[in-house]
Image (cartoon, helix red, strand yellow):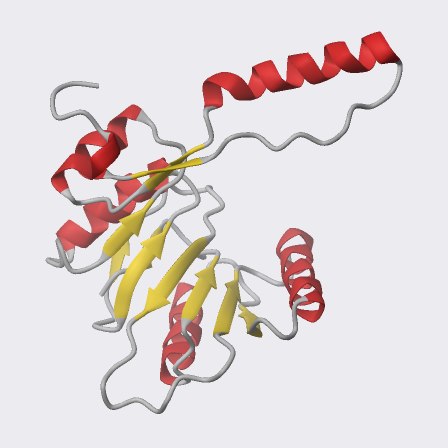
Amino acid sequence: MKLSPLFKPGCLALVAILLQASCNTAPQPAKPRIALVMKSLANEFFKTMQDGATAHRQAHAPEYELIANGIKDELDVARQVEIVEQMIAQQVQAIVIAPADSKALVAKPELKAILCANDSMALGAVAAIRAAGKAGQIRVIGFDNIQAVRQLLKDGQVLATVDQHGDQLAVYGIEYALETLKNKTSPADRETKVDLITAEHTPRHGG
């Protein structure tokens, strides 16, 4: 399996990889099976992440099945690739992975889409897909709606991104703090606006 550059070294990257079911595979299970492939489980941080995922699955048992695994050594990229190949062989519907290095998997005719935790990762995913000669074959979704991703949306290289309106997040926090100081009690939780952004939402020229 070929590895292509996708993430910057030292960055934690959780990526959801959606897998295309082949025509020859068995019927899809009633509940989706999701594989979680962690970085070194000897690292308390990643073990905590896996424990959190396991607890979430227990609380949502009717909704999905979870197959959790990980490597012992953070630098053992080959072993992590092997685990991913095993998960594909087991025909899971998606893989959530914390890559062991500044590389990620782009080469699986089974690979259908990459859901990135932010737009910077989406930019890297697009570059890796180009390098693998798979432009237009793998869908990429980002998160944050940064300026650099908007041209890729127009060109169809990124399917969508999510705008959580960063210009307002700090304002919400300030308003929350002022309300707390004024009323001497904690205000109720407030949902902040989140919008899905596609090529239809981006201007044709500039912007």
Q: Position of residue 28 (x, y in %)?
A: 40, 84
Residue 76 seen anywhere in this rendered image of the structure: no
Image position of 88 with respect to 12: above or below: below
Q: Nearer the viewer, residue 26 or 9?
A: 26
- State left or right for residue 69 relative to residue 150: right
User: As drawn, is 47 to the left or to the right of 69?
Assistant: right
> Residue 146 in the image: x percent, y percent?
33, 27
Between residue 46 and residue 35, name the one nearer to us: 35
Asked whether, in this view, residue 77 is left or right of residue 2, the answer is right
Q: Quadrant of the C terminus?
A: top left
Q: Residue at x 35, y 91 (%)?
A: 26
In the displayed structure, would residue 19 be above or below residue 25?
above
Picture coordinates of residue 46 (x, y %)?
62, 56
Kindly tell me whether residue 145 is visible in this rendering: yes
Q: Residue at x 35, y 65 (%)?
A: 18
**Residue 49 % position (x, y):** 64, 56
Q: Nearer the viewer, residue 40 or 133?
A: 133
User: In which image quadrant can residue 108 be found?
Assistant: bottom left
Q: Quadrant of the N terminus?
A: bottom left
